[in-house]
Image (spheres, grey):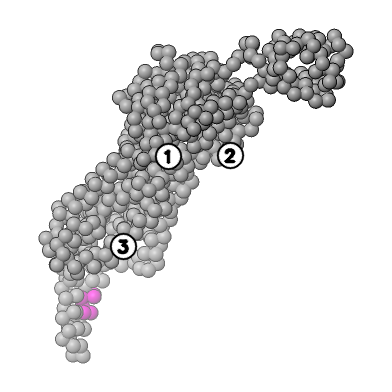
């Protein structure tokens, strides 16, 4: 099995004179959760539909786990599991029949044990014999995950997977992704919900107006020496400011109020500031850390692009 | 391919309306038998030969009276001739069995089979689009044409099922109402005048077999339209309109065909081949069964090719 589960090269889609997707290339490795970010209408869905063979490409190649989509469509598709946009099912059939339907479409025989295993994994055992029209969106999403992973594909694609899910559904979905990735699957997710992607993805690409404008920034790990915005809620903001200026002159103060002060600091610095506050009879009620979010990074990147293009 | 067909079959039979179609055919069989039974009560006790002889006697007596005109005379003489021929050939003109019932009524109920198959086959494609399931269906390790072909084959299998059901229902209902008859009983050809005896079973089979080519073309039109326009309503509406409009349109075409040779190649006159069962029949000068079947076959292949070509190339973007 090749290490790269998805290799997209110079993917282009033109409709008439408009270029919807412009020369996009990227790679996803096994065990990687890769986020495709961008505002609505940037071309994410078009990219996903080209990778899944739903729409024709104007140019470019797609390799799924080593199978070329053009030369061996069936081979490539056998390596793929996906939910394209909303998880749609045959609503007049039961969940089990829907799963059976997709199980039959796999060239490798899928055993009843495997079907049961997948149904249990997505916690649908209690509802699997009910018709899908009775399912909540969260249940349909889980059934969507079930049909996607049934045949143990090496690449999973989820297009806007958290659309319409409640917080618990989103959390469950995130947990599935982590489990699947740890089993060796490469996962491609598209979303415009940046904060959500931050929690899910290992790496990401930003797409805007059909162009890939930033690729493969590994999301900063919590344990690194990254500088975060730290907000201390204290008994006396004036005093806090004084202590900081005297003892931590190199740490920038972002803003302070009567009962709070926020600074840019690393984890180590945050700890020593806290110790120093305590030593100076300043009560600390709360320490909040605002991590530099993917959202900020996204806007940073897109704004930079805008400035450059102007 | 087998698993694809099983999937489509499962979809058809997961819908309640499918069962309604089959129940409807049963009710239609019972209903038509009931109408036939009420309109012409079966008098099985009498000896039909004696009756026919009595009728001939009566008609001959009528001829002897001087009150009737020459025209009426010739009509009565023709009737006597026919009755004598029936007697000679041992054909009961009032024969009522399950086979005569099927020859008269079941052959008309096939229109419902067309309607139901058109509804089912256009929903097999269009509902994948309207439910959004087409996206999940086409990202499987099957080429698109195979998926479409499985739907087409399943439609034809469903048609076969409806036909067999209709046959079984009619056969049994016919026995219950009119008693069991023989396949090889002779009747007069309902489509022609005068003395033209046919075997009732052969007539029934002919009526069904000559119906199939037109049926296939109508179904394929529905399949094509639902694939091209993703709309079941449009597919059903247009294909059923073609079915029912073809009779009046044929009258127009027949009147214009002398001056417009190309009208021979229009689809409509060829959709109903049952006329060809009577040997004397001709749609228009030079029209033969072979010609009609060739025209149908060409339309059929064009419709299928368009459907598959279009589906193969289509961007799935809904």
Q: Is residue B249 left or right of residue B117?
A: left
Give whichever of A181, A228 is nearer the camera: A228
Give the SS element for disc 1.
Answer: loop
The CA distance from mark 1 to mark 3 is 35 Å
Q: Residue at x 69, y 22 (%)?
A: A290
Give the SS element for disc 3.
Answer: helix
Question: Circle 1 is placed at which residue position?
Answer: B317
Q: Residue at x 35, y 32 (%)?
A: A57
Question: Circle 3 is placed at which residue position?
Answer: B245
Q: Residue furthest bottom?
A: B67
Give whichever of B45, B136 is nearer the camera: B136
Q: Residue at x 38, y 56 (%)?
A: B237
The residue segment tinted magenta is: B54-59
Q: Is residue A90 left or right of residue A240?
A: left
Q: Eyeballing the image, is A136 above or below A274?
A: below
Question: Residue A46 at what x, y percent from top left?
Answer: 43, 34
Name the chain under label 1.
B
Disc 2: CA contacts within 10 A as few (<14), some (14-19) or many (>=20): some
Label for residue A134?
2
Q: Residue at x 23, y 56 (%)?
A: B267
What secondary structure is the magenta-colored segment mainly? helix
Q: Are marks 1 and 2 in contact (CB under 8 Å)?
A: no
Question: Residue A22 at what x, y percent from top left?
Answer: 40, 31
Give whichever of A126, A155 is nearer the camera: A155
């Amino acid at each position: 099995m090749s290490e790269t589960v998805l290799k997209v090269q110079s993917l282009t889609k033109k409709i008439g004179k408009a270029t919807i997707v412009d020369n996009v290339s990227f790679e996803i490795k096994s065990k990687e959760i890769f986020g495709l970010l961008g505002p609505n209408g940037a071309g994410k869905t078009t990219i996903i539909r080209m990778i899944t063979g739903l729409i024709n490409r104007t140019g470019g190649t797609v390799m799924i786990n080593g199978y070329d989509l053009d030369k061996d469509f069936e081979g490539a598709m056998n390596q793929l599991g996906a939910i394209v946009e909303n998880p749609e099912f045959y609503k007049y059939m039961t969940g089990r029949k829907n799963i059976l339907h997709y199980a039959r479409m796999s060239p490798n025989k899928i055993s009843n044990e495997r079907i049961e295993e997948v149904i249990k994994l997505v916690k649908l055992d209690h509802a699997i014999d009910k018709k899908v029209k009775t399912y909540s969106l969260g249940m349909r999403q889980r059934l969507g995950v079930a049909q996607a992973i049934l045949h143990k594909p090496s690449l999973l694609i989820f297009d806007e997977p958290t659309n319409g899910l409640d917080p618990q559904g989103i959390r469950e979905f995130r947990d599935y992704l982590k489990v699947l990735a740890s089993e060796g699957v490469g996962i491609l997710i598209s979303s415009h919900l940046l904060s959500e992607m931050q929690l899910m993805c290992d790496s990401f690409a930003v797409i805007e107006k059909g162009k890939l404008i930033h690729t493969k920034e590994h999301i900063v790990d919590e344990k690194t020496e990254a500088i975060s915005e730290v907000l201390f809620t204290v008994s006396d903001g004036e005093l806090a400011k004084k202590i900081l200026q005297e003892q931590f002159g190199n740490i920038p103060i972002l803003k302070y109020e009567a009962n709070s002060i926020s600074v840019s600091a690393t984890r180590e610095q945050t700890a020593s500031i806290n110790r120093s506050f305590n030593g100076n009879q300043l009560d600390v009620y709360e320490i909040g850390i605002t991590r530099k979010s993917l959202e900020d990074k996204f806007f940073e990147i897109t704004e930079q692009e805008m400035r450059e293009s102007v | 391919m087998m698993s694809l067909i099983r999937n489509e079959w499962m979809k058809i039979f997961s819908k309640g309306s499918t069962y309604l179609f089959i129940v409807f055919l049963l009710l239609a069989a019972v209903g038509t038998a009931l109408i036939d039974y009420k309109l012409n009560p079966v008098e099985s006790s009498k000896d039909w030969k004696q009756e026919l002889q009595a009728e001939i006697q009566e008609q001959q007596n009528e001829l002897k009276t001087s009150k009737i005109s020459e025209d009426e005379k010739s009509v009565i003489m023709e009737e006597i001739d026919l009755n004598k021929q029936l007697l000679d050939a041992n054909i009961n003109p009032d024969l009522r069995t399950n086979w005569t019932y099927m020859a008269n009524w079941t052959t008309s109920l096939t229109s419902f089979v067309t309607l139901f198959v058109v509804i089912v086959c256009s929903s097999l494609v269009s509902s994948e689009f309207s439910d959004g399931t087409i996206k999940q269906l086409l990202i499987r390790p099957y080429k698109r044409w195979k998926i479409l072909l499985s739907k087409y084959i399943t439609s034809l299998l469903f048609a076969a099922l409806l036909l067999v059901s209709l046959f079984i229902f009619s056969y049994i209902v016919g026995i219950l109402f009119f008693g069991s008859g023989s396949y090889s009983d002779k009747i007069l050809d309902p489509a022609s005048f005068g003395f033209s005896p046919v075997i009732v079973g052969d007539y029934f089979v002919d009526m069904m077999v000559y119906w199939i080519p037109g049926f296939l073309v109508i179904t394929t039109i529905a399949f094509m339209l639902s694939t091209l326009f993703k709309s079941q309503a449009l597919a059903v509406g247009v294909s059923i309109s073609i079915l029912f409009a073809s009779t009046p349109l044929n009258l127009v075409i027949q009147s214009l065909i002398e001056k417009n040779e190309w009208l021979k190649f229009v689809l409509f006159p060829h959709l109903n081949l049952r006329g060809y069962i009577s040997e004397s029949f001709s749609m228009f000068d030079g029209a033969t069964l072979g010609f009609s079947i060739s025209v149908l076959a060409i339309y059929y292949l064009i419709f299928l090719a368009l459907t598959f070509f279009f589906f193969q190339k289509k961007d799935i973007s809904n």
